[in-house]
Amino acid sequence: MIYLDHHAAAPTPEAVRRAMESAASVAWANPSSTHAAGRASRELLEAARDQVAAAIGASAAEVVFTGGGTEACNLGIRGLAEGRKRVVTSAVEHPAVAESVNLLEREGAEVVRLPVPAGRPPSAADLVRHLDSDTLLAVQWVNHETGTVFPAAEYAEASRAAGARFFVDGTQALGKLPVDVSVLGADAVALAAQKVGGPAGAGACWLRRGLDVGPVLEGGSQERGRRPGTPDTLSMVGFGAACSLIGARLADQPRLARLRDRIEAGLIELGGLPNAGEPRAATVANLSFRSWRGALLAAALDLEGICVSTGAACSSGLQAPSAVIAAMYPDEQWRAGSAVRISLGIETGEQDLDLAYAAFERVLTREGG
């Protein structure tokens, strides 16, 4: 099996597995309990929080653990939107952001969805006329399907100047770009463990110190009153261990960019049309093949032992054309239904891509699906 779906989830490194195995005999206890077992679990939880905070240039007190990236997006967006009348977002957001914004719209907020033609993210100048002190800007940093990098620091500067709040979906940025929230200038940043080799179901929302952000769930006062419910200490240990390896992932990005460019060039020769805006992360190529439906092409490649996807894994069961690609190319709607995403990670080698290319070549010579 050749795994090329790292934007959905990264394989778990041995160091992360070891950390979780070592913690398992203690992490079962409720970290909110004041007895010895609870205190031992709490110690593990706070050590993991320190590791996550260190990976993003934050104070541990600013890191709120959540049950994954989707919950982190909900917390950041819905928490920051409190008391604001307008939400500005892009047309190519992950469902975790898009659906959170849709909920706010149903509750009466005005929503501005900025276009991203051919993958070109809005400029800060495009945002200015929509931003004021009644506004929340909620956008991704790295697009989950195409890898397009949005100018988050420029957005932050524009938001500050206008008095708007700024939420960043950083789930695909962590491990691919240097993330330093102390200089970014955002108000909240969502993170997900499985994008960097941690366990699924573990995430975090960084909230700028001093913000009055309440929970979006009802319950107890865990996580300083921001996220009720007993934290999953063992999963957070895995998240922290994965964050301690971020440096190696960042150092590997130039190599991955070369591998990505090589397979993309080969697939273009086989008839693929790239779907990408620049700049983009090193880890992903997204191409449409006119004579194929993306879901059938991905299935055919799966039979060849090649794991790719057609878009966000949380939407893959719908078998619908990619909303991201459709928004990028409104005049070429065929692209959305014919797109596949090849995403690489630190485990990806040259031989993996040689085998993947050969499989693409075999499949694409057949009659399209």
Image (tube, rainbow, N blue to C red):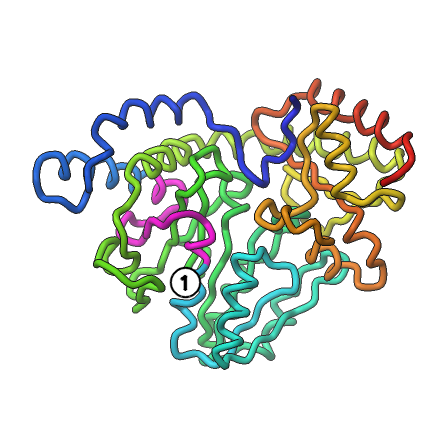
**Residue located at (53% from left, 60% from top):** 97
For the N terminus, which image quadrant? top right
Q: Position of residue 173 (x, y in %)?
A: 53, 46
The reply, left or right, for residue 142 in relation to residue 365 is left
Tell me if residue 125 comes above or below residue 62 in the rendering: below
Q: Position of residue 213 (x, y in %)?
A: 32, 66
Tell me if residue 143 comes above or below residue 252 in the rendering: below
Q: In which quarter of the image is residue 237?
A: top left
The reply, left or right, for residue 87 in relation to residue 37 is right
Question: Is 53 in the magenta?
Answer: yes
Label 1 residue SS: loop
Q: Name the residue under label 1.
A: 187
**Residue located at (62% from left, 25% from top):** 348
Q: Quadrant of residue 2?
A: top right
What stretch of residues is rendered in magenta? 52-73
Residue type marked 1: Asp
**In front of the other: 128 or 224:** 224
Tell me if residue 330 comes above or below residue 345 in the rendering: below
Counting other residues with Cα less than 10 Å from the Cα at mark 1, is it few (<14), some (14-19), or many (20 or more)?
many
**Residue located at (32% from left, 23% from top):** 21
The reply, left or right, for residue 290 in relation to residue 1 is right
Residue most extreme to the left: 35
**Residue located at (42% from left, 35% from top):** 199
Residue most extreme to the top: 351
For the C terminus, which image quadrant? top right
Question: Is 336 in the magenta?
Answer: no
